[in-house]
Amino acid sequence: MAAEGEQATLVLEQGVIILGAALAFVTLYRRVGIGAVLGYLTAGMLLGPHLLGVVDEPQAMIAVGDIGIALLLFLVGMELHPSRLWRLRADIFGLGLAQVVACGAVLTLLVGLARESSIAAAIAIGMPLALSSTAQVLPFLRGTGEISTRTGERAFSVLLFQDLAVVPMLIILAALSRAPGAESRPGWLLVLSALGAIAGLVLAGRYLLNPLLRVIGRVSERELFVVAGLFTVLAAAAVMHALGLSMALGAFVAGVMLADSPYRHELEADVDPFRSILLGLFFVAVGMNLDLAVIVDRPLVILGMALALVAVKAGVIFGIARVSGARTGQSLRLGLLLSQGGEFAFVLFAAGSAAAILSDTAVSTYSAVVTVSMVTTPFLMMVYERLARRRRDRADTSHLEGPDAAPSGRAIVIGYGRFGQTVAQMLMAKGIDVVLIDSKPSQIEVSGAFGVQVYYGDGTRIDLLRRAGAEDAQLLLFCIDGVALDAHKLEPILEAFPQAEVLVRAFDRRHVMHMDGVEVAGIYREVFESAVSMGRDALRALGVAEAEARRVERAYRERDAERLAEQSKSGDLATLKERIFRPGGDMLDDNEGVFDSDKPADPASAG
């Protein structure tokens, strides 16, 4: 019992230290815009056996982290309806196959030439290096919202094929095995096992899992959804693992099974926290398993090999994407996204070592190369974003028409994004002549595809507004995104065009305060009006009468306008904070919102 108590204490202490270090480094790296993965890797390297030695056997954490990868693929699978998978079949089996084969062949050739290795060893190294990091790229795509974009779908398709390719790669390594007395199943039997397991999982999901979820839904116990979600992932992963296949593949199939389930969103919400934690632990374990002595002994060699890996993969994927029809920018982004080595490389290197194809030195060296290549991805994406912004700033606008060519209009809308489009289309619905101006070439080109003429230029410049006919316009509407438009820019415009009323879009409350004192006809906060509308509908949904809901709305508008006026004078957001409605605080007075039913809302507090 004493030994068990000491072991439990040790596990608890290690857990606290690991989570604390991960929290510190991830927070630090997030603040500087590097990304979470590098934070987890750094924490692992620091706590691993090669530095502080907090954890002596990090392999156990790798096993736990593999469950995190399985959960990630499960969540991705739930986002993919079978119809969407069918739509992506050309990318999965075209682009994905081309990437794996081309990168694998080039890297195998380079490894063979550089190390003068045997053909078997070169294949056992080149194939795993062709794989990219699903655990790194997919969270990045989900975080940036690109998972549903064309580039995101291409990246996902390649990653999915790579996960599928792990099975034949394991078959190839088994066929090349030099281990004495090694017994392995024939490759065709492994393929049949994979197909049979997938078919079995699909049938189990249709006839067992969905009925079970319906029963749980009737019970209305959220804890049961958590248990059901984890059971589904672990059971599917366990089936695949027992057959010698990828656990992540089993979890992905389980996710696809539930893509059409009415309980999909509930399962996603319950499983996602576990995915985040376990995936973080996976990268901590990767950092712990990194043999720092290999890097210290040959730092320039390891760094050079990692950079060569990134350059080769990025170049090959860029070329394949261009041939497949992607634009140059999309192809470059895809190449950089998938340029690193992947977590399944560690699995395949271990299989190559067990098959007596790779030496321990080779496994340590190339594991270090893969890890270092993972570190480069956040920096590469930062550089890409910076270059993309510069390219957009320097975009050729010579083919875009300026406002000189615009016919005269009663209103001029500056900024034809999501906000300006609504404003302009309401005016055009009444046949009012409107001149549209925007400074983003991409927005102008998209609008042109819909038959809407938008003129190029900086609509805050007085000379450009004159060319657009502002001296004869009755209304100037500034619908520009962000907080660039302030009192300093507005005052000269008001002086230059005194006959026109000016309405201004504001980003938030602070932006309104910064425009205090400017005599415009109205300032409209971006989300205010839609939020008030939702609040009014929420009251009605809870049984509040229509007239009372309108009274509450008017009272809230009055208080908000009062607070905003005083905040603008003082410059302090905390001014009149006692007038905010809060839980357990003061409620609506009987007379509030009663006597101003015909009074229009203060434009400074609107939209």
Image (cartoon, helix red, strand yellow):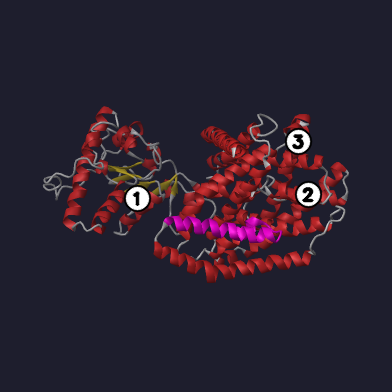
Left-right relation of 131 to 84 = right
Q: Nearer the viewer, residue 310 or 432?
A: 310
> Considering the numbered disc 3 on the image, is that residue within a helix, a strand or a loop?
helix
Q: Position of residue 602 (x, y in %)?
A: 22, 43
Q: What is the spatial separation of the Cα atoms under label 3 and label 1, in whole angstroms?
A: 65 Å
Judging depth in this view, the residue of 545 and 214 nearest the camera is: 214
Earlier sequence position, callout 2 versus callout 1: 2
Q: Which residues are magenta?
A: 222-251
Query: Front-most of 120 and 466?
Result: 120
Residue under numbered circle 2: 126
- Specify which label sits upstream in the sequence, 3 or 1: 3
Q: Tell me the SS state at disc 2.
A: helix
Which quadrant of the rendered structure holds the N terminus?
Answer: top right
* Residue, disc 3: 302
Q: Which residue is mark 1?
A: 408
Q: Say whether marks 3 and 1 touch (CB < 8 Å).
A: no
- Mark 2 or mark 3, which is nearer the start of the sequence? 2
Which amino acid type is shown beneath numbered disc 1?
Ser
> Which residue corresponds to the image point at 64% horizontal and 50% vertical from the top-left?
331
For disc 3, the neighbor class at 10 Å (few under 14, some 14 to 19, many from 20) is many
Residue 248 lies within the magenta run: yes
